[in-house]
Amino acid sequence: MGKSDIGPPSYKKMLPAVIEKNYGKWKYHEITKPGVLRHVSESGDEVWTVRAGSPRLVSIDFIRDICDIADKYCDGKLRFTSRSNVEFMTPKKENVEPIIAAVQKLGLPVGGTGKAISNIVHTQGWAHCHSAATDSSGLVKAIMDELYPYFTSMKLPAKLRVALACCINMCGAVHCSDIAIVGIHTKPPKVDNSKVSAVCEIPTTMASCPTGAIRKNPDPNVKGLVVNEEKCMYCGNCFTVCPAMPLADSTGDGVAIYVGGKVSNARHTPMFSRLAIPYLPNNPPRWPEAVNAIKNIVEVYAKHALPDERMGEWIDRVGWENFFKLTGIPFTEYHIDDFTHGIDTYRTTTQFRW
Amino acid sequence: MADRDTPLINNLEDGPWPSYVKEIKRAAKKNAAAKDLLGVQELSFKDKITHWKHGGIVGVTGYGSGVIGRYVDVPEEFPAVEMFHTMRINMPSGWFYTTDALRKICDIWEKYGSGLTNFHGSTGDIILLGTDTKSLQPCFDELTEAGFDLGGSGSALRTPSACVGPARCEWACIDTLDICNNLTQEFQDEMHRPRWPYKFKIKVSGCPNDGVAAIARADFTIIGTWRDSLRIDQDEVRRYVKNGFDIKGIVTDKCPTKALAWDEKAQKLNLRADDCVRCMHCINKMCKAIRPGLDRGATILIGGKAPIIKGAYLSWVLVPFMKMEPPYDEAKELLHKIWEWWDENGRTRERVAELIERMGLKTFLRAVDLKPLPQMVYRPRANPYVFFD
């Protein structure tokens, strides 16, 4: 047995020399063009950053490729952003264009800065997860192929953060994104009572249900569970604690689109994303229904929002009634919140738009 | 095994955005599991359903977390991914790397795993995707020799993460990288040996722009802020204006508390410092002229999480201002008090915010020895149902 609890290596060993020297001394920065940042220090030093998109699910040879670029131009150092972009940093301005050329030669886009769509934060999907209600990498690829020009330019009213979670567990915590895409189930779990007693703890499974829809099977001869299907909203929490309650369904599973969330405190306080489209089908490999719906929302936002207005700030100004009108998305009974904190969303004023 | 035709996923090799399918194919040239993953992905595209089973308990000696067991539900068809476990490797703070460190990880993963990775998973770890049970221990042993360790999983402290902070950002009010690294090293046991009601996340953002989404994604949210006034360089402000910058339209009109006003006649940007709520907008738009103040620390917020189970929460203000100097004892003591109360009272799979909602913020504040402050709420209660005790 080897070492244990050594923790991660210190970031101090990983910093480029210009970063180490100017740590905590940065004065200002500018985006000189899409994907290129220039940070200037109190010392007068500067560091140039080239930001490149990545598919996130990558081979070790991809990592070696980007290491080659960093070895050649960045003294063997690089970093990643919280949205899986790769950043190449150099104090030398003359290295910027060769880095861009090398990055593009690998087929990677340069961009994701300022008033752009950055890389989509996402989860594992059908590539690796047992509870996925949609794919992640595939759907993200289909979306980013369509939104690509918004990554490599800065022509939106403000930054636009897109995130995707392949089920409502949201291990990617997408719930405060300008556009959140969420995999959803629409059918109750199918209880396999032949397995329940072997692989599940019955009280834990019952307690896991947020709506109290699961109870002991009333048949004394069956050691198992029953689901009150009218009370089930397909969250899958029971499946997480009890594998004998699968709810994935090839025709029922799909995606929902939520919009208008943000985490930054700039101007408006942080906001949750809210339901725009309750359900679109899983239609691989290109998910045209979901991709077109997202593209429409982006285009309507780009056309109507004022400069520096995030999606949620624009909707806040024009009102949700106008959001639905402008995007042509139907408002349905599914949009009205009837869960625990829903009542706070009901309108208590005569102020609204027609 | 024979090469399979994968027409559905092959479609995703086209298009301008870099293709993960091409990446799986690169790995598949050297590795049978990566090759079978192509087949599993194709089958899911055809069936519109996942083919991964619930994970079992697998891991390395002495650890309860950091490895996620994964098994395919059609092992007879795809034997190389019958086991396809994930290893979460704790990244360095801020996701900075030397290429030597990255190449070492690649070499180890070439030897023991599928050659597929995520840089990074959504919590921030390096994700090594796909290996079998017997490879876990030797892979881990070599990773620790190379200076890396596992991250968190299950009902444990999850791998803390931080924004780029003072390493390359002029707005960092706290040393996010050092705080993240220090807390991670302090709480190795809490990360590696799950024993709580559910997961617990810590994220550190250097300023209220909140680059790592700490307010939405962390149970314990640390966001850099300042107590004194914005610093305004009036010469630089005038330079912006002279160059045609619409200071009224872009900056002062958008100040949420109207704390800023541009005096055209005096060519001066006036600030009512008491009204500034440190939203960052003016700083974001005029970073050469306006900077955060100098009396810096963090606002600590509690409870951010995704919807499971009771709904999504944004973190609530808990400590409006805390100085953040190493060794960060005040934050650590607060964390211990929070964990003790949550561990004592929380139900299975109940996050700390849900427990606070169930038992009341008042009860929680008493348990962690904090006094109520108006900064903790938007507004006081409107109802008369007060429990006097």
Image: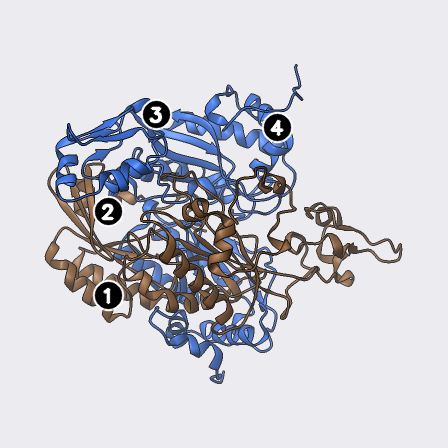
Chain colours: A brown, B blue
Q: Position of residue A336 (x, y in %)?
A: 62, 49
Instruction: Name the residue that disc number 4 marks.
Output: B360
- Residue drawn at the location 10% of the way across and 58% of the way down: A94
Q: Position of residue A329 (x, y in %)?
A: 52, 60
Crowding around mark 3 (Cα neighbors within 10 Å: few <14, some 14 to 19, many 20+) is few
The mark closer to the camera, 3 or 1, is 3
> Could you tell me how far apart the alpha carbons at marks 1 and 4 are, in whole angstroms?
52 Å
Crowding around mark 4 (Cα neighbors within 10 Å: few <14, some 14 to 19, many 20+) is few
Query: Which secondary structure, mark 3?
Result: helix
- Residue drawn at the location 71% of the way across and 45% of the way down: A207
> Could you tell me how far apart the alpha carbons at marks 1 and 2 are, in whole angstroms?
21 Å
Q: Amino acid at mark 3?
A: Asp
Instruction: Name the residue that disc number 1 marks.
Output: A103
Crowding around mark 2 (Cα neighbors within 10 Å: few <14, some 14 to 19, many 20+) is many
Instruction: Name the residue that disc number 2 marks.
Output: A15
Identify the chain of the residue marked 4, using the numbered disc in the image: B
Left or right position of A169 against A32: right
Which of disc 4 and disc 3 is earlier in sequence?
3
- Residue drawn at the location 71% of the way across and 47% of the way down: A211
Instruction: Name the residue that disc number 3 marks.
Output: B275
Q: Residue furthest top?
A: B389
Q: Amino acid at mark 1?
A: Val
Q: Residue furthest front?
A: A354
- Whether residues under marks 3 and 1 lie with C-beta atoms below 8 angstroms apart, the answer is no
Up the image or down, B383 lies above or below A332; here it is: above
**The C terminus of chain B is located in which quarter?**
top right
The mark closer to the camera, 1 or 2, is 1
Identify the chain of the residue marked 1, using the numbered disc in the image: A
Q: Which mark is residue A272?
A: none
Q: Amino acid at mark 4?
A: Gly
Query: Which secondary structure, mark 4?
Result: loop
Query: Which secondary structure, mark 1?
Result: helix
